[in-house]
Image (spheres, rainbow, N blue to C red):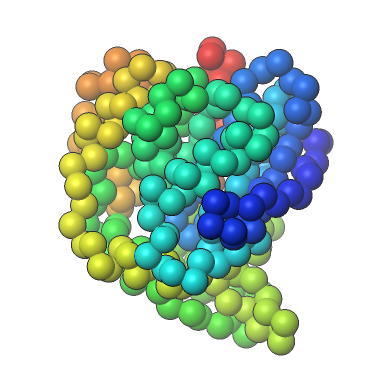
Amino acid sequence: MPQFIEKTYTAQDGLSLYYRDYGKTSSAKTPILCLSGLTRNSMDFHRVAQRLSIERRVLCPDYRGRGHSDYDLNPYNYIPSTYLNDLRHLLTLCGVHQVIIIGTSLGGLIAMAMALAIPSSIKGVVLNDIGPEIATTGRERILKYIGTDSAPTSWDAAVDELKSLFPNLSLTTDEEWLEATQATYRLDDAGVLHPNWDIKLVKPLLHDAALPDLWPIFHALDHVPVLGIRGALSDLLMPETFERMGTTHPEFTSVVIPNSGHVPSLWEPESEAAIDTFIHAL
């Protein structure tokens, strides 16, 4: 299977930002940009990127404050407009003018923002368990844990903690749970485990509790095909929102992943089949 090259670039404000570059830059097919969830990073997309990079280039960035990217000294820079600016720099650096986006949770919201700000850069979008309405229960659950610096005493303890936080993930084997856990926690220089994100990124979310109307932003995607993926047990993307997305978008394909909450791993057979069919049709 294709592997990746680890790269960094410098953001406009001087932060060093990390990304994984899979596949051949010479591929004639439209590259894929994988955008992770709020606290997540490029490791989440490793299986997906390996599979898709057989035929095309796949870029998987770590947002500032996540994974291998620098943390921002000003936590109020952890907002979509900053991420959008960082991604513009990444695409320019990579010489990429148009992409297919696979956006998980926050990544899907950023995809919508890109469609509004730079519409010609997008050929199609996969929205993984995210839409223009975010259920209060799911949002409150997320805000509660992302600002906490838990310190599991071992990888086994970290796996147990992840299972308690996300009991409805579609992961089934010990190997899958460990892989997801290793993308969630990091070892510091003293050998102590911590969340693999800057816990201060919760600050702007607490400061601005009211969400704007996201439906107009979602409809910035009306000019491109969209694949919506929803976990059947999701507490963030409600069935009625998902249904409305399908009835109001002119070219919307949908799939529901059984026995999965927020978010589907995209390793599920149903996710893989839907993504492959969607991308090959573009």
- Determine if residue 271 is in view: no
Residue at the image point whose x is 56% and y is 83% from the top: 151
Residue at the image point whose x is 41% and y is 34% from the top: 114
Residue at the image point whose x is 71% and y is 16% from the top: 28
Q: Give coordinates of residue 236: x percent, y percent.
A: 31, 50
Q: Is residue 247 left or right of residue 264?
A: left
Residue 217's image quarter?
top left
Q: Give coordinates of residue 183: x percent, y percent.
A: 62, 60
Q: Give coordinates of residue 159: x percent, y percent.
A: 59, 70
Residue 187's image quarter?
bottom right
Q: Name the residue nearer the viewer: 82 or 269.
A: 82
Q: Is residue 218 left or right of residue 17?
A: left
Q: Name the residue nearer the viewer: 13 or 147.
A: 13
Residue 262 versus residue 177 in the image, above or below = above
Q: How many marks?
A: 0
Q: Name the residue nearer the viewer: 261 or 25.
A: 25
